[in-house]
Amino acid sequence: MKKEAKIYVAGHKGMVGSAIWRLLKEKGYNNLIGKTSKELDLRNQHAVKSFFLTEKPDVVIDAAARVGGILANSNFPYQFLMENLQIQNNLISQSLESDVNKFIFLGSSCIYPKFAPQPIKEEYLLTNSLESTNEWYAIAKIAGVKACEAIRKQFSKDYVSMMPTNLYGIYDNFDLNTSHVLPAMIRKFHEAKLENDRDVQLWGSGTPLREFLYVDDMATSVVFALENKMGQHLYNVGSEREITIKDLALLIQKIVGHQGSIMWDHTKPDGTPRKLMDSSKIKSEGWKPLIDLEEGIQLTYQWFLENNNNIKEVRL
């Protein structure tokens, strides 16, 4: 990939998109395009078409999506389904129409069945039912994966889908209404620490197993896919290390320095009991993660401490 290639990073202000943007800059790519949601509404087909006709990108990296945790997915199923379909359909179809040869679509491990065999392989897609707490987002992302596969099959373009495990890191979403489990825990323990180490209440039993990947490692996988001809249409991207939610809570509690107790609310859902990705395909092609969980949480918490006064609340 030439350093002067015009690369459009959709969602470049989000956690994942900004990590990709930083890495591309570090590696010397000097013709990056980014638009905020106010500058370009990706749900608007006409606006996306006009943007492509004007900018003529060589590469598109789709890191744009409406995202959130169990609570947000449960409360707003229509928005999570429809807005994600609109965003990705506009980007994918316009990339094809504009003869973009390299398209990287980012999704989520939630595309796989709730009770998929572990670790989860790419071929388990569409073999069973989804986890009900995030099926709306998952269905949208599955449609994106299949659209890229269809283009690859029919038009022989290098359109590839990357399915990361649970991501976290700097520029994460720490709003308790919409955030995922790890950043939500960081904020809960931090605020409880400031309030005389009061007890912290967490959802579920703490028994589910989860895998986490620091966002900068995800960025390296995307740039790897950018710089190499990928042999498959779909790749899992994960650390291949798992931890119980309870042990995750204890690790975050230790890093934050909270001295109170943890109370588990067993009336709240656990979600999928176990979700470990098999990332052997992309690892066999030469990519590997470098940042372990404890280091990643420390980096994330330090960023949170430096920026928590500027973190916006999202009221849905």
Image (cartoon, grey):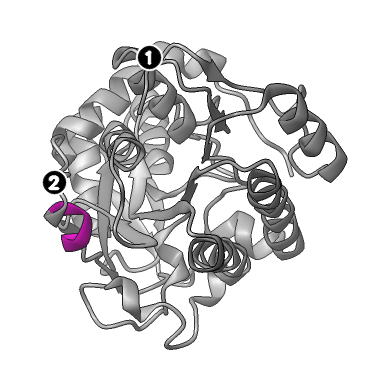
Q: Nearer the viewer, residue 140 or 248?
A: 140
Above-or-below relation of 122 to 88: below
Circle 1 SS class: helix
What percent of the width, then of the height, locates residue 151?
Answer: 56, 62
Crowd rating for badge 1 (residues with CA inside 10 Å; few <14, some 14–19, many 20+): some
Q: Is residue 273 above or below residue 127?
A: above
Q: Mark 2 = which residue?
A: 286
Relative side of 311 to 195, left or right: right
The disc, 1 or 2, on the residue closer to the chain's N-terminal end is: 1
Q: Nearer the viewer, residue 3 or 185?
A: 3
At 77% across and 24% down in the image, what residue appears?
38
Observer able to see residue 290: yes
Q: Which stretch appears magenta?
A: 279-283
Q: Is residue 16 magenta?
A: no
- Residue 116 x/y as whole percent: 33, 82
Which image quarter: residue 291?
top left
Q: Which residue is mark 1?
A: 25
Q: Position of residue 25 (x, y in %)?
A: 38, 14
